[in-house]
Amino acid sequence: MKPVISLDRVTKVYQNGKVITKVLKEISFSIFPGDFVSIMGPSGAGKSTLLYILGCLARPSSGWYKLDDVDVGTLPDEELSRLRNEKLGFVFQSFHLIPQYTALENVLLPTTYRRARKKNGRKQQNERARRMLDMVGLGERYHYLPGELSGGQRQRVAIARALMNNPEVILADEPTGNLDSKQSKEIVRLLKELNKTGRTIIVVTHDPDVGYQARRMITIHDGVIQSDKTCSLTS
C-alpha cells in the first residue's frame, strides 16, 4: 500500500531580520490510507507548523512532502490550491464558521471553490451538504445560525464542511480545544466513526485524552520527532 502522505527530512525555517528560527528539523514519516494519527507536543514544539505543511498551507524550507504521491513542493500556487481543496478537509479549534450563514450554507462553502460541471450541480451540492449534516447528527438544524448552536454542534458543522468535497484526509487542529469534556468525547467519537469508514484522520492536539484515542501517536518536541508509537486506547 502506498502512503497518502510522506515527509522526508522536512525542515522549516523562519527568518525575522537577522534572527533565524528553525521550527522543524528534518521531520520524516509516512501516513497510510485509513490511518488515525495524533500529533502531540507542547506549545512551541512545531506541531502547528507541521500541520500547515501537511495542509499545503506552507512549504518546507528543505526536504520534500508528497501528498498522494505528488511532490507538493514542485507545484505552482494555483495547482497547490486545487490539490488542497480536493484532497484535504480541515477542522479548526475555533470552527471558522461564517456567523451570518446557516449550518447548510457553511457546509456548502468548499463548493464555491469548485465549478459544478453539470447543470444540476448546485442541486446535487445541496443534497450532499444535507447528507453531511445528517451524518454528523445535525439533520434538524440545517437552517440554524452558528450562534444558535452549541460548541459541539458548531464543530460538527465544521466536520460536515470538511467532508463536503469528499477528501482523502481530514486534518483537525485542536478540534476539542474550545469544548467541554462531554462535547470533546462526542467529537472524538465522530472522528473515530469517520476513520472506520476508511477516512484518514490526522489530529493535532496537546490533550493526551484526545491524542491517545488515535491508533498512532507522533510526539514532537523542539521541532524533532520524539516518539512515533502505536496507541491502545482506540475502543
Image (tube, rainbow, N blue to C red):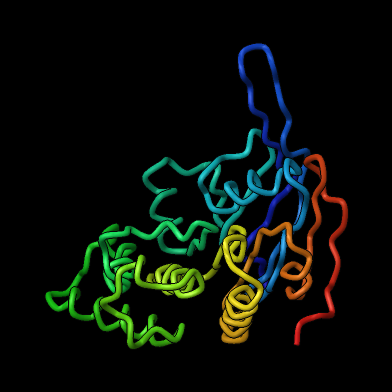
Could you tell me which residue is drawn at 66 percent across and 69 percent down?
2
Q: Residue furthest top?
A: 18
Residue 193 in picture, x, y percent from top left: 59, 85
Q: Quadrant of residue 83?
A: bottom left
Relative vertical location of residue 76 with respect to residue 125 in this rendering, above or below? above
Residue 12 in picture, x, y percent from top left: 67, 35
Judge whether residue 166 can be spotted in this image: no
Q: Quadrant of residue 6?
A: bottom right
Relative vertical location of residue 207 with respect to residue 18 in this rendering, above or below? below
Could you tell me which residue is drawn at 69 percent across and 59 percent down?
205
The answer to whether 31 appears left or right of 145 in the picture is right
Image quarter where the N terminus lies is bottom right
Judge whether residue 16 can be spotted in this image: yes
Image quarter where the C terminus lies is bottom right
Residue 135 in picture, x, y percent from top left: 44, 86
The answer to whether 40 appears left or right of 127 in the picture is right
Closer to the camera in the image, 70 or 143: 143
Closer to the camera in the image, 208 or 66: 208
Could you tell me which residue is drawn at 80 percent across and 50 percent down?
220
Residue 168 in picture, x, y percent from top left: 52, 70
Q: Residue furthest left?
A: 119
Q: Quadrant of residue 11?
A: top right
Could you tell me which residue is drawn at 57 percent across and 86 percent down?
197
Numbered-mark total: 0
